């Protein structure tokens, strides 16, 4: 059994998440702490199904993908499902032409959570290998809410010096010059 996280610590991480900026101050994030072991196992089983489907979709990279540690749902101290709230339609401030700003805001909350955990020596992993409808059902979420992440949180022996996928040779970080343009798309050198 993994070493538990102090409840006050977890509360600080959620408070940091809740302090994130959000478009129109809509605060669209909702956190569900998964305390029930059977529910955690059901989430894990679903994620494993999706991991296998992802491997099949990757074709020749399937075996490499299956060797990666892409989730720790059964191994970590805490699991949280992060979702976008229901009834987001009235929030048009900043979303009228870009409705995805609720997702951007919730992503800021997840990053705040992640950074707060890391600052206290706790690891956090963002699992996205799932069918949102299935996670919504498992977690009894409202019909128009959207689960966007399963967070695995716990003590780690050490942090990676670089992102795990980079260390494992899956891909490498692009140079900044390849992602920063001036005045027009792909106007940067090497773009």
Image (cartoon, rainbow, N blue to C red):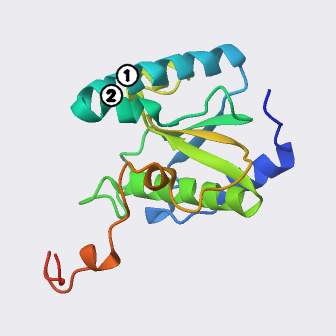
The percent position of residue 67, horizontal first and vertical second, equals 46, 32
The percent position of residue 36, horizontal first and vertical second, equals 71, 19
The percent position of residue 144, horizontal first and vertical second, equals 40, 32
On the picture, is 162 further left or further right than 17? left
Give 183 or 57, whichever is nearer the viewer: 57
Residue 144 visible from this viewpoint? no
Residue corresponding to mark 1: 52
On the picture, is 101 further left or further right than 73? left
- The count of marks equals 2
* As drawn, 170 above or below 83: below
* As drawn, 153 above or below 94: above
Of the 4 image quadrants, the one containing the N terminus is top right
Label 2 CA crowd tier, 10 Å (few <14, some 14–19, many 20+): some
The kind of secondary structure element at disc 2 is helix
On the picture, is 168 further left or further right than 115? left
On the picture, is 158 further left or further right than 142? right
Residue at position x 69%, y 59% in the image:
118
Give 55 or 82, whichever is nearer the viewer: 55
Tag 1–tag 2 contact (CB < 8 Å): yes
The percent position of residue 119, horizontal first and vertical second, equals 72, 64
Residue at position x 37%, y 22% in the image:
52
- Disc ID at residue 55: 2
Residue at position x 23%, y 32% in the image:
60
Tell me which corner region of the image, top left, top right, bottom left or bottom right, holds residue 3: top right
* C-alpha gap between disc 1 and disc 2: 5 Å
Residue at position x 41%, y 26% in the image:
51
């Amino acid at each position: 059994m993994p070493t538990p996280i102090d409840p006050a610590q977890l509360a600080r991480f959620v408070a940091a998440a809740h302090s994130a900026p959000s478009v129109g101050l809509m605060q669209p994030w909702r956190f569900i702490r998964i305390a029930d072991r059977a529910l955690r196992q059901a989430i894990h089983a679903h994620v494993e199904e999706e991991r296998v489907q992802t491997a099949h979709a990757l074709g020749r990279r399937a075996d490499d993908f299956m060797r990666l540690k892409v989730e720790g749902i059964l191994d970590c101290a805490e699991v949280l499902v992060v979702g976008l709230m229901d009834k987001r339609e009235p929030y048009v401030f900043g979303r009228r032409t870009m409705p995805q700003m609720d997702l951007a805001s919730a992503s800021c909350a997840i990053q705040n959570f992640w950074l707060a955990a890391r600052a206290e020596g706790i690891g956090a992993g963002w699992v996205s290998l799932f069918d949102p409808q299935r996670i919504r059902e498992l977690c009894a979420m409202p019909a128009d809410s959207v689960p966007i992440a399963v967070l695995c949180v716990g003590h780690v022996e050490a942090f990676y010096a670089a992102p795990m996928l980079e260390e494992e040779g899956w891909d490498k970080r692009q140079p900044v010059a390849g992602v920063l343009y001036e005045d027009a798309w792909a106007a940067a050198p090497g773009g």
